[in-house]
Amino acid sequence: MTDPRLKAGLLQIYEDLAQDLAQLAPVCDLSGRCCRFKEYDHRLYISRTEAELLLQDGLPVDAVINEDNCPFQKGQLCTAREKRPFGCRVYFCDPKYAGQAEILSEKYLEQLRELHRETDTVWEYGELHLFLHEAAAQRGLSTTSHGTSTPET
Ligand code: SF4
């Protein structure tokens, strides 16, 4: 993330999202379901910009990278809370919140794309584990993978 406007814009989007969520007040019961992808049959897609912020301080030392879980989850909790991607921030199990994640995603992902256009930054978007594998490879770590795809541009 070479352009400082990109990080500042991303943090502003996260802040604006937090204000929208404060209005909606969905309940998080700390089940940890949002981070156990295989067990609860969902996928986490993020942009490269978000991945760079998430990985700013590197991977957890004991990281096991695969498509099934997030290596930042310890117990039921996220250890990357301040830097977690947008998809994590909008995910709540609260039934009263049903449908809101899609609305917020549409609103803020468009803002994030616009931020990339304004800063002449290539838009890359893919599953979390693809970016984690890249980071691990740069550190010379071995990982487990069931796929070989790369983030979309
Ligand atoms: S970054 Fe945090 S909230 Fe997001 S999937 Fe990983 S552990 Fe869960």
Image (cartoon, grey):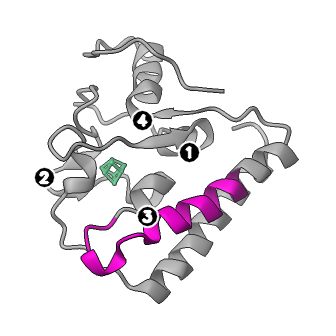
How far is the residue under mark 4 from the one under mark 1? Answer: 10 Å
Element at label 1: helix
For the residue with label 4, is its CB less than 8 Å from the closest atom of ligand 1? yes
Q: Left or right: where does residue 50 sit relative to residue 75?
A: right
* Residue 72 appearing in the image: yes
* Residue 94: quadrant of the picture: bottom left
* Residue 84 appearing in the image: no
Measuring from the top left, give residue 12's x and y in whole percent. Answer: 67, 66
What number is the disc on residue 75? 2
Give the foreground label among 2 and 4: 4
For the residue with label 3, is its CB less than 8 Å from the closest atom of ligand 1? no
Query: Mark 2 belongs to which amino acid?
Result: Gly
How far is the residue under mark 2 from the one under mark 4? Answer: 19 Å
* Residue 37 against residue 88 in the figure, above or below: above
User: Magenta span: helix, strand or loop, mainly?
Assistant: helix
Q: Earlier in the sequence, mark 3 or mark 1?
A: 1
Measuring from the top left, give residue 98's x and y in whole percent. Answer: 35, 72
Q: Earlier in the sequence, mark 3 or mark 4?
A: 3
Query: Residue beneath label 4, please?
Result: 128
Residue 80 vs residue 86, the one in the foreground? 86
Give the foreground label among 4 and 1: 4
What number is the disc on residue 50? 1
Query: Mark 3 belongs to which amino acid?
Result: Val
Q: Residues within 10 Å of mark 2 (few under 14, many from 20)?
A: few
Element at label 4: helix
Residue name at image x 48 percent, y 51 percent: 85
Q: Earlier in the sequence, mark 2 or mark 1?
A: 1
Query: Mark 1 belongs to which amino acid?
Result: Glu
**Range covered by the magenta-colored residues:** 92-112
Measuring from the top left, give residue 48's x and y in whole percent. Answer: 59, 35
Query: Residue beneath label 3, please?
Result: 90
Q: Earlier in the sequence, mark 3 or mark 2?
A: 2
